[in-house]
């Protein structure tokens, strides 16, 4: 067995996230599986000589790093890392690097290892920018690295946010920042959402944003083993779920002219929001649509939208005073558009078929139809056929041990009705989604209940299959699920569909 392990260059030692293993405490590349020999070692040393890259083993991974990747460069790069899955266990850096460089300059390759030194079958690759990373995903996802062995490649989720549940509801953002800064480092921001009924209280959970993934991981590692107490309240800590839905291309996001506003009061009129925006910015609004506690604000040009968001997010500005979150609205991706259109078409056809069958005098779902009141925007309360909604309610109650509500809203573009489904566990919203726009309240309710039931049931079946009702998913599980189920997931609230 060969016993080589190149040390890190002293000038770049600080760029590694943790202290690297040295020659004296690890056998380095020779710490591969027992079946590995000097042949693999020689190949990797030859790769380093030809490329001038450094190879360092640390904390269960081996890093192949480009000379220009310093700590400062790493901090500037966002969204440029990809995840590679389904790799052969005997696939090493010298085989991966030429393939990865088909998309562009490779700055870093992190190959995950097990305790024996064998690879775990997945890796992470870092590129100079997000555009190159997207190109790599497009080119390499499904690439046959060996005969009959395609690999999976998706954008890596650079999660820098932790979820804290069960926090005291009477504490402010400033108090959380002060208290949590005593326990952990690297906190950039805290997202706190006011209670819909009493805005002086929060909803009992917060999101804590860190400067990078490593800071978030270190904080989670420190907090997750035992009980975490904040002001004598035991809180739960875990990774925050990434925004659902497809990632939106940066080129598309650069042309977005709509703002997404969150944390609005439920009873705040739409015209009042328009008045506040125009009084603060003096910039004309093209269109504004409020849906419950959030709204989409459209401007005529990108420049107008940028100026409005900059003014509204100033320290002491409207967003801070009103406790609103104001960000760019995300357009619906092509996969979600196609899925939504398919669901709309199926729901419309199903509604037509039911109507035709009812006209012929046939009983539909005999002895199973119940009548429930449903909330609407209007003052009048309609009583609708709640059969499909009842199936969803039964699933949420019996399987998810939660409760759900239905809200019917009017849609103006296109005209019709849209149903919002909200799932609560205790006093916390754990799921919220909208059905498609339908011509009647009944078809809107049926379509929303059917589509959301299928989403929740698919997600539940997937969780049961992967056995994830025990410990929470780690980042690698999320990457692999996203790679295999890219088109699944609830409609993001931040998608601008009106």
Image (tube, helix red, strand yellow):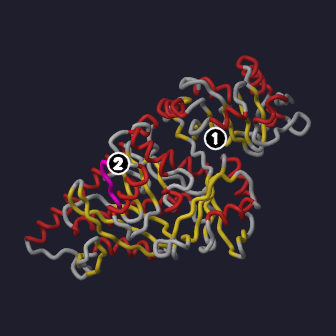
Quick check: 497 left or right of 395?
left
Q: What stretch is highlighted in magenta?
A: 284-290
Disc on res. 121:
1
Q: Residue furthest top?
A: 50
Residue at left 49%, top 66%? 430
Q: Residue furthest left?
A: 360
Front in this rendered view, residue 160 or 457:
160
Q: Residue, x 46% and y 37% (percent of image)? A: 250
**Percent x, y of residue 260:** 42, 52
Nearer-the-camera pick, 217 or 359: 217
Give the mark nearer the N terminus: 1 vs 2: 1
Q: In this view, does 413 lie above or below 397?
A: above
Callout 1: helix, strand or loop? strand
- Nearer to me, 365 or 450: 450
Rendered residue at 63%/58% (across/down): 208
Residue underneath mark 2:
298
Q: In this view, does 449 lie to the left or right of 21?
A: left
Q: Can residue 84 be seen in this view?
A: no
Left-right relation of 72 to 292 = right
Quadrant for the N terminus in the image: top right
Percent x, y of residue 48? 74, 22
Is residue 81 shown above or below 265? above
Q: How crowded is mark 2: few (under 14 residues within 10 Å), some or many (20 or more)?
A: many
For the residues labelled 1 and 2, the Cα–Cα distance comes to: 45 Å
- SS state under label 2: strand
């Amino acid at each position: 067995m060969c016993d080589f392990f190149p040390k890190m260059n002293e000038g770049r030692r600080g760029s590694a996230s943790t202290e690297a293993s040295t020659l004296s405490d690890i056998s380095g590349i020779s710490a591969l599986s027992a079946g590995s020999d000097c042949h693999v070692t020689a190949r990797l040393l030859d790769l380093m000589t030809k490329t001038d890259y450094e190879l360092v083993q640390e904390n269960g991974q081996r890093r192949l790093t480009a000379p220009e990747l310093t700590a400062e460069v790493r901090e500037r790069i966002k969204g440029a890392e990809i995840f590679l899955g389904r790799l052969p266990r005997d696939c090493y850096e010298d085989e991966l690097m030429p393939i990865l460089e088909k998309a562009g300059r490779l700055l870093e390759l992190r190959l995950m290892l097990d305790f024996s030194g064998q690879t775990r079958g997945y890796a992470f690759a870092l590129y100079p920018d997000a555009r190159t990373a997207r190109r790599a995903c497009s080119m390499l996802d499904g690439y046959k690295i060996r005969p009959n062995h395609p690999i999976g490649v998706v954008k890596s989720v650079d999660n820098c946010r932790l979820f804290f549940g069960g926090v005291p509801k009477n504490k402010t953002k400033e108090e959380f920042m002060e208290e949590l800064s005593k326990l952990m480092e690297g906190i950039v921001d805290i997202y706190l959402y006011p209670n819909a009924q009493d805005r002086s209280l929060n909803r009992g959970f917060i999101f804590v944003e860190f400067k990078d993934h490593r800071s978030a991981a270190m904080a989670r590692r420190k907090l997750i083993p035992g009980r975490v107490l904040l002001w004598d309240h035991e809180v739960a800590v875990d990774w925050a779920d990434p925004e659902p839905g497809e990632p939106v291309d940066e080129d598309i996001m650069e042309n977005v002219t709509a703002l997404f506003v969150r944390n609005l009061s439920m009873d705040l009129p739409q015209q009042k929001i328009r008045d506040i925006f125009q009084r603060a910015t003096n910039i004309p609004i093209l269109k504004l649509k409020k849906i419950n506690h959030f709204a989409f604000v459209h401007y005529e040009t990108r420049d107008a939208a940028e100026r409005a968001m900059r003014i509204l997010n100033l320290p002491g500005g409207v967003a801070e005073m009103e406790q609103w979150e104001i960000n760019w609205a995300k357009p619906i991706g092509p996969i979600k558009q196609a899925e939504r259109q398919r669901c709309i078409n199926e729901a419309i056809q199903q509604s037509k078929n039911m109507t035709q069958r009812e006209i012929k005098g046939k009983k539909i779902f005999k002895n199973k139809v119940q009548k429930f009141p449903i909330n609407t925007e209007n003052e009048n309360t309609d009583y609708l056929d709640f059969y499909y909604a009842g199936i969803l309610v039964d699933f949420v109650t019996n399987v998810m041990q939660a409760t759900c509500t239905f809200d019917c809203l009017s849609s103006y573009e296109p005209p019709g009705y849209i149903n919002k489904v909200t799932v609560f566990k205790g006093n916390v919203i754990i799921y919220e989604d909208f059905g498609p726009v339908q011509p009647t309240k009944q078809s809107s309710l049926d379509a929303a209940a059917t589509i959301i039931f299928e989403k929740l049931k698919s997600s539940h079946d997937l969780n049961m299959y992967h056995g994830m009702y025990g410990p929470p998913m780690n980042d690698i599980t999320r990457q692999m699920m996203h790679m295999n189920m890219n088109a699944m997931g609830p409609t993001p609230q931040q998608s601008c569909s009106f």
